[in-house]
Amino acid sequence: MMAGMKVSGKAWKFGDDVNTDLIVPGKYLELVDPHEMAKHAMEGVDPDFPGKVSEGDVVVGGSNFGCGSSREHAAIALKYVGVGAVVAESFARIFYRNAINLGLPALECPGISEAVSEGDSLEIDLTGGKVVNATTGKELDFVPLPGFMVEVLGEGGLVTYIRNHLDEW
């Protein structure tokens, strides 16, 4: 779960080059309800994922997570199925921006795919730049998100952030 700027939950591990079609298959692009999208999260690699994941759990990816088309559905589905953060070796840039804009932490953490096994308990400090594998005791550092991105995440995404701060501009 995300409390303050910390996320903790069970790790769900996926490999390299997990594309947006695997995260939410194209046949669901007509969906507009985020809760309906969530029912199909990770369907291309684990059709049972929505029934197994718990609020605050962490998706761990290899390199180039979220490659493929620029659809926002992928980040929306992960957020609404309850994923607290996605931590990967690297991200496709458009997925990374979509995730942050929609209020889903996306963190690049070198070595994460080797340091985590599926089911491990993870604790992530978004502002401190640290992932702790509570199961093994292993700690990994990542470059903390810039302050503005932390503010966007803290308010649930870019649209909410802009609505909340429009009178300041």
Image (spheres, rainbow, N blue to C red):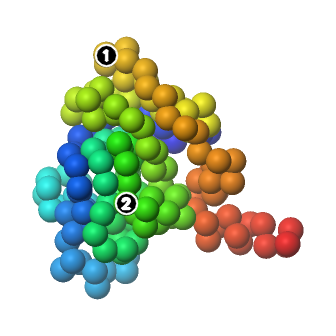
Residue 119 visible in the shown view: no
Say which residue appears at 23% left-offset and 55% top-offset: 17
Say which residue appears at 37% left-offset and 60% top-offset: 92
Residue 69 visible in the shown view: yes
Say which residue appears at 30% left-offset and 26% top-offset: 115
User: Residue 103, relative to residue 36: is it above or below?
Assistant: above
- Name the residue beneath numbered marker 1: 136
User: Residue 7, relative to residue 168: is it above or below?
Assistant: above
Q: Which x, y percent locates residue 44?
A: 15, 62
Q: Which mark is residue 4?
A: none
Q: Is residue 17 left or right of residue 121?
A: left
Q: Which mark is residue 92?
A: 2
Say which residue appears at 37% left-offset and 18% top-offset: 138
Front residue of 110 and 152: 110
Q: Is residue 131 left or right of residue 52?
A: right
- Residue type of the residue flagged with mark 1: Thr
Q: Which x, y percent locates residue 39?
A: 25, 64
Label 1: which secondary element: loop
* Count of numbered circles on the image: 2
User: Residue 60, relative to residue 139: is it above or below?
Assistant: below
